[in-house]
């Protein structure tokens, strides 16, 4: 896929997107791919234009690398992805706050477990960018569900996957899905409708 447009004011060495594509190409992923990063970058850009980031370069790098390591069912994906932040920034001469970007990446392990007061405003916006798929148009949400199912097919039976997925979705419905006002206004209602429909069917 074509390289996303480099945001104004962010400077990195050439080849940054090709590197991201290579990292996200293995193992083969149905959902957590470079295409997912591109989608999250679109939400990052929306925040940049309409809300504003306190640390633009840092959140941008966190988006790029938040799923750089992804193996379905492994509990250390986020930690291993966070460990890539420092060497990636050094390689591409990026001025992000490495410690903060890595911390944001690690926070993605807690999707669905955090309350609004558990994170600061910028972290809430970053996490909501990653969760915005839940409020996508129904057909895109359904494709996302199928893609996640495909990623787990090699390691979990349909029965086990369905049980775990139902538990995750029910937990999301038990509290506000989005942590920021901006994403709650845009996507909360559509996300709840998508999840409730999925629970009536199968996701």
Image (spheres, helix red, strand yellow):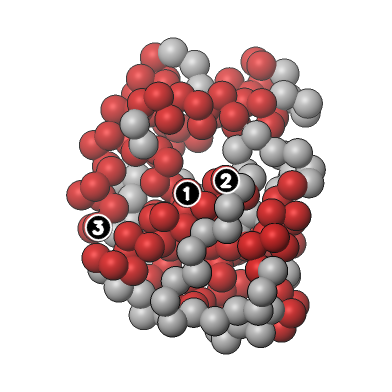
Q: Which residue is mark 2?
A: 35
- Alpha carbons under labels 3 and 2: distance apart: 23 Å
Q: Position of residue 82 (x, y in %)?
A: 67, 67
Q: Secondary structure at mark 2?
A: helix
| Residue toward you, 8 or 185 | 8
Q: Between label 1 and label 3, give the one nearer the viewer.
A: 1
Q: Secondary structure at mark 3?
A: helix
Q: Between label 3 and label 2, give the one nearer the viewer.
A: 2
| Residue toward you, 130 or 143 | 143
Tell me where residue 74 sits by quadrant: top right
Q: Position of residue 61 (x, y in %)?
A: 56, 70
Looking at the image, residue 88 sits to the left or right of residue 118; the answer is right
Which label belongs to residue 39?
1
Q: Position of residue 37 (x, y in %)?
A: 55, 53
Looking at the image, residue 130 sits to the left or right of residue 87; the answer is left
Question: Callout 1 environment at 10 Å: few (<14), some (14 to 19), or many (20+)?
Answer: some
**Residue contact between numbered discs 2 and 1, judged by CB atoms under 8 Å:** yes
Q: Is residue 133 placed above or below 114 in the rendered structure?
A: above
Q: Is residue 80 visible?
A: yes
Looking at the image, residue 193 sits to the left or right of residue 101; the answer is left
Q: Residue at x 44, y 13 (%)?
A: 201
| Residue toward you, 191 or 33 | 33
Question: Callout 3 environment at 10 Å: few (<14), some (14 to 19), or many (20+)?
Answer: some
Q: Which residue is mark 3?
A: 182
Question: Callout 2 environment at 10 Å: few (<14), some (14 to 19), or many (20+)?
Answer: some
Q: Is residue 152 placed above or below 94 in the rendered structure?
A: above
**Mark 1 vs mark 3: which is more N-terminal?**
1
Q: Residue at x 78, y 26 (%)?
A: 154
């Amino acid at each position: 896929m074509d390289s996303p447009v480099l945001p104004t004011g962010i400077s990195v060495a050439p080849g940054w997107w090709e590197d991201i594509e290579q990292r996200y190409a293995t193992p083969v992923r149905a959902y957590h791919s470079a295409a997912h990063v591109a989608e999250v970058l679109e939400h990052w850009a929306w925040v940049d234009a309409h809300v504003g980031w306190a640390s633009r370069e840092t959140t941008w790098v966190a988006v790029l690398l938040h799923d750089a390591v992804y193996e379905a069912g492994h509990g250390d994906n986020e930690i291993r992805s966070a460990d890539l932040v420092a060497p990636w920034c050094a390689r591409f001469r990026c001025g992000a706050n490495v410690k903060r970007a890595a911390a944001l990446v690690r926070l993605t392990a807690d999707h669905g477990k955090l309350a609004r007061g558990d994170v600061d405003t910028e972290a809430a916006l970053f996490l909501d960018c990653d969760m915005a798929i839940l409020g996508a148009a129904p057909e895109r949400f359904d494709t996302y569900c199928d893609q996640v199912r495909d990623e787990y097919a090699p390691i979990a039976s349909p029965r086990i996957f369905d049980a775990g997925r139902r538990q995750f979705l029910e937990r999301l419905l038990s509290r506000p899905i989005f942590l920021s006002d901006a994403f709650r206004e845009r996507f909360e209602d559509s996300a709840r409708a998508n999840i409730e429909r999925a629970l009536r069917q199968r996701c």
